[in-house]
Image (spheres, rainbow, N blue to C red):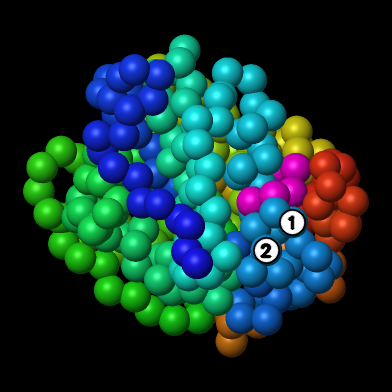
């Protein structure tokens, strides 16, 4: 029986409307999945796209749910779980001091294409039946494997209304996602130019600045500093992973280096091929799934 309850804009928490005064960030997470995604396999436990609790991008120490549950200032308001369907979990967090509400959906790994279609739909400002937070989002975020290296999706044109911003944390997102976000009308504030590991510590660092009105190189610097700490690499190398929209030449790797490699199964930041975002890295261990935090964790999807 499906128990995932779609959130209503009129949902009341602690006596007030949830989205009354806060900015809303909607995050689309495509769970890491060894079987269905064109990735270099990760350890089985953290690469099972049907099990959010252990997944690299959701339940591991740097996964969205676990990271934001532990992050200072963030409070988990609700969590909704489904044993079937496209979206397996939905979590809602709030940061009172930043004035932000964050809604995050964990998509079954093999549903990555649907995840991306929903991301671009939300970026365009289109509503989705039963998910009113789509239309209220001030920022939309994608975290996961760059599925656009393997398949194409259609991005709807902007629906009008308020403008929204976007962050895309996956490998070489500027080249693959940029044109589609342009069509959708969303303004990207952080994208990537290299193979990288999309840990949620990057998003949390970005939100700390975004809530205060920072954009451009300030956001890029925040992301780079967080990435350097996690990957144990230099600040310069870490900043080169990211690109700020007001400085399209930032980022120190040529986009074509990765986009036009042959086939979808080239190594994306794991030992044996590819880059780990400007530095060394290693495969996340099973220990990571239970809260460990190995240094220099490998680049991602």
- Residue 54 numbered mark, or none: 1
Q: Is residue 184 above or below residue 219?
A: below
Percent across and percent down for residue 9 are 26, 38
- In the image, taking residue 83 as reference, residue 296 lies left or right, namely right
- Residue 37: x percent and y percent? 61, 77
Q: Which residue is mark 2?
A: 51
Marks 1 and 2 sit apart, C-alpha to C-alpha, by 6 Å
Q: Residue at x 20, y 65 (%)?
A: 156
Q: Is residue 293 left or right of residue 38?
A: right
Position of residue 65 relative to residue 168, above or below, is: above
Q: Residue at x 75, y 43 (%)?
A: 61
Examine the rendering and report whether any part of residue 227 can be seen: yes
Q: Nearer the viewer, residue 203 or 136?
A: 136
Task: State yes or no: discs 1 and 2 in contact (Cβ < 8 Å).
Answer: yes
Which residues are the magenta region? 58-62
- Say left or right for 148 vs 267: left
Viewer-nearest residue: 145 or 278: 145
Q: Quadrant of the C terminus?
A: bottom right
Measured along the vertical axis of the image, is residue 204 above or below residue 65?
above
Crowd tier of the residue under label 1, counting other residues whose Cα lies within 10 Å: few below 14, some 14–19, many 20 or above: many
Q: Residue furthest top?
A: 97
């Amino acid at each position: 029986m499906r128990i995932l309850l779609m959130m209503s804009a009129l949902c009341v928490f602690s006596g007030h409307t949830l989205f009354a005064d806060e900015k809303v960030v909607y995050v689309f997470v495509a769970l890491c999945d060894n079987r269905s995604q064109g990735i270099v396999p990760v350890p089985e436990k953290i690469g099972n796209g049907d099990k959010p609790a252990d997944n690299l991008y959701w339940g591991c120490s740097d996964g969205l749910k676990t990271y934001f549950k532990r992050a200072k200032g963030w409070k988990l308001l609700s969590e909704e779980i489904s044993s079937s369907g496209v979206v397996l979990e939905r979590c809602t967090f709030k940061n009172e001091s930043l004035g932000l509400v964050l809604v995050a959906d964990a998509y079954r790994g093999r549903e990555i294409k649907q995840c991306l279609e929903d991301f671009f739909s939300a970026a365009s400002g289109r509503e989705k039946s039963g998910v009113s937070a789509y239309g209220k989002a001030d920022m939309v975020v994608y975290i996961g494997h760059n599925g656009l290296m393997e398949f194409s999706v259609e991005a709807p044109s902007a629906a009008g209304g308020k403008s929204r911003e976007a962050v895309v944390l996956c490998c070489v997102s500027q080249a693959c996602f940029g044109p589609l976000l342009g069509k959708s009308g969303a303004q990207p504030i952080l994208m990537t130019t290299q193979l990288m590991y999309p840990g949620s510590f990057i998003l949390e660092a970005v939100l700390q600045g975004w809530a205060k009105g920072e954009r451009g190189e300030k956001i890029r610097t925040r992301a780079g500093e967080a990435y350097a700490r996690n990957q144990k690499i230099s600040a310069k190398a870490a900043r080169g992973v990211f690109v700020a929209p007001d400085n399209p030449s930032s980022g120190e790797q040529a986009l074509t280096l990765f986009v036009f490699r042959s086939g979808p199964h080239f190594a994306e930041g794991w030992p044996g091929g590819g880059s780990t975002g400007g530095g060394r890295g290693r495969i996340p261990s099973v220990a990571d799934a239970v809260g460990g935090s190995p240094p220099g964790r490998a680049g991602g999807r």
